[in-house]
Amino acid sequence: MKSLITRYNQKVKRRGLAGLDTAIILIAFIITASVLAYVAINMGLFVTQKAKTTISKGEETASTALTLSSSVLYAVNYPLNSLSYWIYFTVSPSSGISSVELSPQTTAISFTAASSGISLSNIYI
């Protein structure tokens, strides 16, 4: 039987065809595995970046008890534009905070106007 198969393969010239089929299948498996590994690594990096963004946003929110909830309004001495009479702004508690004590002993209010070079700290009236 073996000699019959050998004679048939010599007639048809199918000597190395079995090895070629195996090589093609092996290459297909390697390409598929590399694509799947690439997708898995990219998804892992994407999830890591999203987690980092979420953590930093949560820390930012948790570290601030009050947030600015409207525009800042102020009145100045109109002809001279030198002195401010008042500054008005609305603050509200950050998410997850029910109330904030706003007494001079527990609250520090600071004002910074970078364009004018003004920086006032602990101005509570």
Image (tube, rainbow, N blue to C red):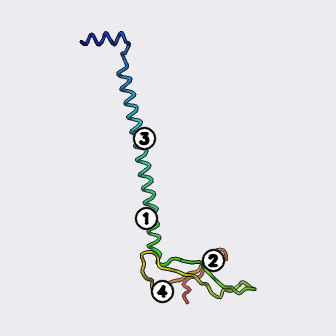
Dot 4 amino acid type: Leu
Count of marks placed on residues: 4
- Where residue 116 sits, quadrant-wise, is bottom right
The answer to whether mark 2 and mark 4 are in CB contact below 8 A is no
Classify the position of the N terminus by image quarter: top left
Q: Which mark is residue 35?
A: 3
**Residue 12 position in % (x across, y down):** 37, 12
User: Where is mark 1, residue-wise?
Assistant: 55
* Residue at the image position 71 percent from the left and 84 percent from the top: 82
Q: Which mark is residue 102?
A: 4
Q: Secondary structure at mark 1?
A: helix
Bin the neighbour count of mark 3 within 10 Å (Cα to Cα): few under 14, some 14-19, many 20 and up: few
Dot 2 amino acid type: Ala
| Closer to the camera in the image, 35 or 108 | 35
First in sequence: mark 4 or mark 1? 1
Dot 3 amino acid type: Val
Dot 1 amino acid type: Ile
The answer to whether mark 4 and mark 1 are in CB contact below 8 A is no
Q: Which mark is residue 113?
A: 2
- Which of discs 3 and 2 lies nearer the camera? The answer is 3
In the image, is 83 to the left or to the right of 3?
Answer: right
